[in-house]
Amino acid sequence: MPDDTRRHDADLLVRIAHRYWVDELTQEEVAREFALSRPKVQRLLDRARAAGIVEIRVQTPPWLRLDLERDLRSAFGLAEAIVAPEHADPGDQRDAVARVAAQYLERRLADGMVVAVGHGRGAGRVPPHFRPRRPVAATFVPAMGGSPHVEAPTNPGEIARALAERCGGRFVPLFAPAYLESREARDSLVGQEAVAHALGLAARADMALAGIGGTDDGATMVRSGCLSVAEVAGLRERGAVGDLAGNYVNAEGRPVESAHRDRLVALSLDELRRIGLVVAVASEPEKPMAILGTLRSGVVDVLIVDPANARAVLDLAAGAPPAPAAATPARR
Amino acid sequence: MPDDTRRHDADLLVRIAHRYWVDELTQEEVAREFALSRPKVQRLLDRARAAGIVEIRVQTPPWLRLDLERDLRSAFGLAEAIVAPEHADPGDQRDAVARVAAQYLERRLADGMVVAVGHGRGAGRVPPHFRPRRPVAATFVPAMGGSPHVEAPTNPGEIARALAERCGGRFVPLFAPAYLESREARDSLVGQEAVAHALGLAARADMALAGIGGTDDGATMVRSGCLSVAEVAGLRERGAVGDLAGNYVNAEGRPVESAHRDRLVALSLDELRRIGLVVAVASEPEKPMAILGTLRSGVVDVLIVDPANARAVLDLAAGAPPAPAAATPARR
DNA sequence: TAGTGGAGTGAGCAATTGCGCAGACATGGG
DNA sequence: CCCATGTCTGCGCAATTGCTCACTCCACTA
């Protein structure tokens, strides 16, 4: 009677599984009760799980997109990917992402930490949602120079200052614009003690928070007056799809070589890479390519993003394989 | 924003629960990922379980009545209660119970064990289903004398012999009828070396397997010719509801004092109690009161029973507290 | 303003669990 | 018939987990 035996075995699995998972006996107690060895009980429990007799279900609210997060993590080797709840209105969406980013920040932030801060409309909305339970003695420093419009709330300096204020931390200013007019001017400024100090501090930061910028004519870099429409167009021609703290990358994630880089006051991609925890925030609707590029650069550890971009980036990464020329999806 | 905070907390619980139970990270890994302490992760996981975010379900086939088993265990302080799959036909039902009992026996039986065996129609069907994977050097000995019809398959001796045969074990016979005609005859017989040896062995058994007998006119004791209808009626008058190895008990589980006891060749209730593992088998439709009484006697460690009797016994125990005289609501 | 109670925290330890191992056993092929 | 092969077993260790225990921080009270 093989069928009968099989059924009996299954019944035993159910009994044991019940006793262990529902009645919460230990494996040893179960073993004693059924006159089996403890390892055998463990094996039977494993079998029960494999056979689907035991089902562990985590009730996930619909606004959590853990599937997208998992795919992003594995597709780009991220330490973490967080997809914010979806919103139809771009402003609401940006706020939702920013809120999640702020909460993430609150969790990671600890006394004594140094946080380098980039720019971006998404990052700019983080401070209003940032409200740690208790004061944190952290230091916030811009990871790049600011825009000519001093008070623009997407300015790294403004964001860093606001964050410091919100948690009772320290703010170290970086007295520099994002771009100077010549390499010489840039080198001269970076040589200044005050500027060098801030940049050095940022380079040694424990964490970085940066928006991901695009290369369209309405990108933050353009709106804030850092770059002209013509300059961005030039970058586009060279394959640039987006930037992280002013460092433009192409769709493969490699830095775009251009004269701009010599005029930029900011942490380089290599310097960012050396920071243990680089958190990138993106919530503009037209950004999937920018996100793709920056993720492929291997600089980003944590991505905080809206569902639409998350889906779009995954589609791009899956659908359009690396791109013809250099098929080197720079992972880490 | 208390509502927002609550929702965020719940989201965190879901994330952590997912990471732990679905992705199977360790608590420590989860703690690292979320920048929390390990104990805190544990507390959050507990909370997630308590909040019903995590649901562990054991898919139980409909023929398993784990609920009845649990209730029986707790109502009568049993080490184990096993309810066999239900069958409409009494014969099939008896076989189902016997099969489960045989499987239980196979699990508990180990080399060197001594098993004392009682009588009963239910117990009598056990041997045909008893087929251990490998030979077991166990010893089977009757716990009581036999019936005058030597070959009756419900005879303790027959059952013990068949079990021993089935597993390649040893059978020690008890050369005695269940009841003798006088106390003197009984005492004389019990004094005989061969009988005393078998009874002594049975008293030191590691396990006992016994049917639960009733006190109706069709009870095994009557059918097998051990007792007359008049004798059983006399027992009923004294409150007897059932027996275990010839020891009659009333509805409260106390032994029924009567002249029979002095004529009985069997282990006493006290001797049975001293055996570590007394397994009682019951599957006759009219037996709930008998089961109730024997369970209340505190002799039984393991009950193997059909669903109808299981329900009926629980109803009796819950609904009709101890029972005044000896009301026998014939349920099934 | 100091005191008091309650909730929440991480350290540390004991219990539980997972797992690699060597040996026993059946099975089937040479 | 013997031996290879794979499965199943329990042992013992190392990792993981549950839990107790001070301790802190906050809210409320006298």
Image (spheres, coloured by chain):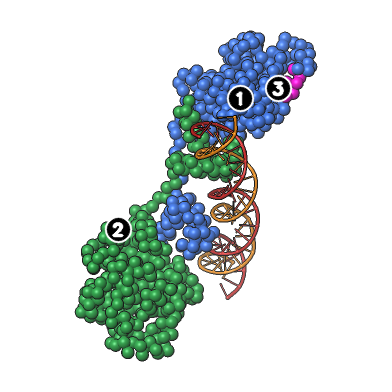
Chain colours: A blue, B green, C orange, D red
Mark in front: 3 vs 2: 2
User: The residue marked by circle 2 belongs to what chain?
Assistant: B
Three-letter code, disc 3: Leu
| Rendered image quadrant of residue A160 | top right
Task: Name which of mark 1 and mark 3 comes first in the sequence.
Answer: 1
Q: Which mark identifies residue A167?
A: 1
| B219, B265: nearer the viewer | B265
Chain part drawn in magenta = A195-202
Label 2 environment density (alpha carbons within 10 Å; few <14, some 14–19, many ≥20): few
User: The residue marked by circle 3 belongs to what chain?
Assistant: A
Residue drawn 59% across the image and 11% down it: A223
Three-letter code, disc 1: Cys
> What secondary structure is the magenta-colored segment mainly?
helix
Left or right of A258? Residue B289 is: left
**Residue A289 shows in the view:** no
**Residue B73 shows in the view:** yes
Taking A37 as reference, is A328 above or below it? above
Question: Is there one chain holding both mark 2 and mark 1?
Answer: no
Between the C-alphas of marks 1 and 3, the distance is 24 Å
Q: Which residue is mark 2?
A: B318
Residue A138 position, x and y percent, is: 66, 27
Question: Is there one chain holding both mark 1 and mark 3?
Answer: yes
Residue drawn 25% across the image and 72% down it: B239
For numbered disc 2, what is the local secondary structure?
helix
Three-letter code, disc 2: Ala
Mark in front: 1 vs 3: 1
| B117, A327: nearer the viewer | B117
Residue drawn 36% across the image and 90% down it: B188
Residue A229 position, x and y percent, is: 62, 9
Q: Which mark identifies residue A267?
A: 3
Taking A253 as reference, is A27 above or below it? below
